[in-house]
Image (spheres, rainbow, N blue to C red):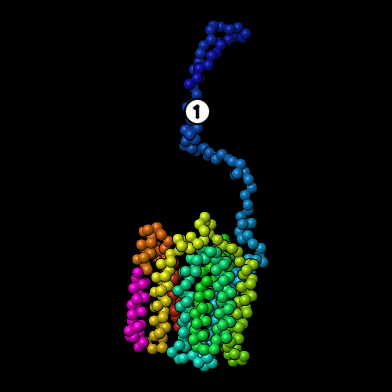
Amino acid sequence: MSVVHEDITLGSRSWGPKIELPTLTSPLASRPHLRSLSDRRSGEVIQPATTESSSEPQPSTKANAVGFSKLRSSLIVFTLAGLSSLNTLGSGLLTVALPQIAQDIGLDESLLLWPASVYALAAGCLLLIFGAVADVVGAKLVWVTGSFLYVVFTLAVGLSQTGIQIIVFRTLLGIAVSMCLPTSVSLTTNTFPRGTWRNIAFASIGMGQPFGYSVGLLLGGVFTDTIGWRWGFYSSAIINCFISVCAIWALPSVHRRTDKPWTRQLKEDIDWIGALILSSALGILLYVLAMTTSSYRRFSDVQNIVLFTFSVLLLVAFPLYMNYQVRRKKPAIIPNKLWRNVPFAATCIAVFFCWAAFNAFQYFSTL
């Protein structure tokens, strides 16, 4: 409350002494925070204070949507979908040409399914590891390296002269493609925001697998009956070489922002033990199943029983180790809480049984 002095005047003449009249000043005037509270209660909308940074023009959403020209965006989709097609094109070639391949290189009947089995074995066991490594060193580097290795080993499969050679080279092919499959997803999600381009990219990658397999079946039959099954793998290597060269320019560099050097990230930010446990369990299990494909009676062999038991123990130990890592707040390659997501778990189960039935049919139908 403040005091002011007033003269009581009538016309130009002063009447009496000055009288001090009190005037009330609201306590909210000296307390801005109380005024803000009062204004909010009364329904007045308080506009935040503008700063110099907020007055600067913001980039348009459309400009940030893709960040690449249509040509480069199309090439990104082409390279990722192209390798996805070549991944299954080799399986289609092998499906049709397997009897002729076995005859030409002297592949033993007990090893007929090994060229296909070892490919899936190597790829499936290393997907998690290469996906984790790509998060550290960059998805583009891992993808391009795997793509060029795929060219080399595809050519090597076509040049194979013995059954052991084709099995070894198909194993190396599986390792190469395991470098490309997880990084394709990373490159897609980090390149395209949600919207049309991302949908096109994922749809093309998904469509590339059945498309490549269908083309592989067709080319496998044509080449086997004409110039030879080897030219199917030569053609695949030539196409993949072109795709790999395009990828060097087209694919963007994707890196995780961190102050750690990449060597320290490889050591501290990857769950190497968890990846080793799961990869070993799957590898041993698939080996035992491959050994029993020729005859289920081989499952009773002591070696297969021991290996099967060991793989089951590793599979049981894996979720326990994941829980241990989470409690220690350490990296976990597949946290157990991920499986509580019902849509994710249901999708994984459905994909597992669909591909199990599809792969079994595609190889046994040609024998």
Q: Say whether residue 211 is visible.
A: no
In the image, the segment drawn in magenta is 297-317
For residue 349: magenta?
Answer: no
State the residue position of label 1: 30
Task: Report the number of discs.
Answer: 1
Could you tell me which residue is drawn at 38 percent across and 61 percent down?
325
- At label 1, the amino acid type is Ser
Residue 74 screen position, x and y as percent: 63, 68
- Mark 1 packing: few (<14 Cα in 10 Å), some, or many (20+)? few
Residue 282 screen position, x and y as percent: 41, 75
Lateral position of residue 279 relative to residue 143, left or right = left
Q: Nearer the viewer, residue 155 or 30?
A: 155
Q: Secondary structure at mark 1?
A: loop
Q: Is residue 40 above or below residue 183?
A: above
In the picture, residue 205 is in which quadrant? bottom right
Q: Is residue 210 above or below residue 26?
A: below
Q: Say whether residue 183 is visible.
A: yes
Lateral position of residue 59 relative to residue 276, left or right = right
Residue 100 screen position, x and y as percent: 53, 91
Q: Nearer the viewer, residue 359 or 346?
A: 359
Residue 359 screen position, x and y as percent: 47, 81
Could you tell me which residue is drawn at 47 percent across and 36 percent down?
37
Could you tell me which residue is drawn at 55 percent across and 86 percent down?
160
In the picture, residue 313 is in which quadrant? bottom left
For residue 312: magenta?
Answer: yes
Could you tell me which residue is drawn at 55 percent across and 73 percent down?
146
